């Protein structure tokens, strides 16, 4: 069974136990960024490694994971990378020796601090296989055309992070487009809706953050 990588960050956690059990299944390898370990502990998940300066992890949580011989890598508080990026570098080391990691799922990556939230989202331009999960929200990065399957009725937004997206064609949506250019400062691509079981997003140039949301059901199911 292919391994699934899941990263626990120290942001907002509004996940049900059912959601977390579905995401962190038997084939999941979990990494915790410092205080993210508090939430892994809360949901009863065992990380492969805990990385960070350890200023946010609770003492009882740190003691518990030490007793379970979980690998803990402590770094100085003053460093050139966030704990999140340190974990991504660690996963890159692992993946060089194993099969390519197609997707890395991130929980607790949004909320609490706007600076960390923005940093976490923009890091997708470097680590393109990240997927941020909320209970009913999925956020990922795209710089080439793609097709969405079985996402009917989901809300859909595009946030260009390049200066503009060129020749954008949307099919299978409430608001479709045909080879239009949209600048980064435009709000035109926010709050669309997927109407078909298969919807396509085609464009020639651009770097995009994609946000899928469904208030009626969990996107994992």
Image (spheres, rainbow, N blue to C red):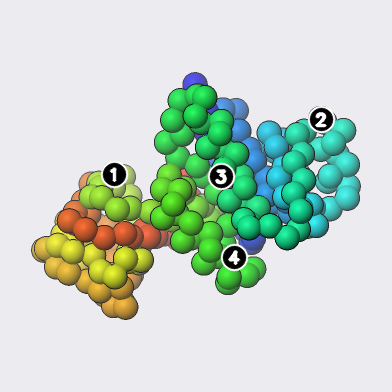
Give the mark, 2 or 4, whose residue is nearer the N terminus: 2
- How many C-alpha atoms fall within 10 Å of the one at disc 3: few (<14), some, or many (≥20)? some
Q: Residue at x 28, y 77 (%)?
A: 186
The residue singled out by tag 4 in the image is 116
Give the mark, 4 or 3, whose residue is nearer the N terminus: 3
Give the mark, 1 or 4, whose residue is nearer the N terminus: 4
Question: Is residue 221 depicted above or below 94 in this figure?
Answer: below
Q: Residue furthest top?
A: 1
Q: Residue at x 57, y 43 (%)?
A: 89
Q: Secondary structure at mark 1?
A: strand
| Disc marking residue 69 | 2
Return the residue nearer the eye: 47 or 85. Answer: 85
Work out how far the residue at label 1 is from the one at label 4, CA to CA, in angstroms. Answer: 31 Å
The residue singled out by tag 1 in the image is 149
Work out how far the residue at label 1 is from the one at label 3, CA to CA, in angstroms. Answer: 28 Å
Give the mark, 2 or 1, whose residue is nearer the N terminus: 2
| Disc marking residue 193 | none
Q: Residue at x 61, y 52 (%)?
A: 84
The residue singled out by tag 3 in the image is 88
* Residue depth check, mark 1 versus mark 4: number of the one nearer the observer: 4
Q: Determine which quarter of the picture holds residue 91.
A: top right
- How many C-alpha atoms fall within 10 Å of the one at disc 2: few (<14), some, or many (≥20)? few
Q: Determine which quarter of the picture holds residue 158.
A: bottom left
Q: Secondary structure at mark 3?
A: helix
Give the mark, 1 or 3, whose residue is nearer the N terminus: 3
Q: Determine which quarter of the picture holds residue 165.
A: bottom left
């Amino acid at each position: 069974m292919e391994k699934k990588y899941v990263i626990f960050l120290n942001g907002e956690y509004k996940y049900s136990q059912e959601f977390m059990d579905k995401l962190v299944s038997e084939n999941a390898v979990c990494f915790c960024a410092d205080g993210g370990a508090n939430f892994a502990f809360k949901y009863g998940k065992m990380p492969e490694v805990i990385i960070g300066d350890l200023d946010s992890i609770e003492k009882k949580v740190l003691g518990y994971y030490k007793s379970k011989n979980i690998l803990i890598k402590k770094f100085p508080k003053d460093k050139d990378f966030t704990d999140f990026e340190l974990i991504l570098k660690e996963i890159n080391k692992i993946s060089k020796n194993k099969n390519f990691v197609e997707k890395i799922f991130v929980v607790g990556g949004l909320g609490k601090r706007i600076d960390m939230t923005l940093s976490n989202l923009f890091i997708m331009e470097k680590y393109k296989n990240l997927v941020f999960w909320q209970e009913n929200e999925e956020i990922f990065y795209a710089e080439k055309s793609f097709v969405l399957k079985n996402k009917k009725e989901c809300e859909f937004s595009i946030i260009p992070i390049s200066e503009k997206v060129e020749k954008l064609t949307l099919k299978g949506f409430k608001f479709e487009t045909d080879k239009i250019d949209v600048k980064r400062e435009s709000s035109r691509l926010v709050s669309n809706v997927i109407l078909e079981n298969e919807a396509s997003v085609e464009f020639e140039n651009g770097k995009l953050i994609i946000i899928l949301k469904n208030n009626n059901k969990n996107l994992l199911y």
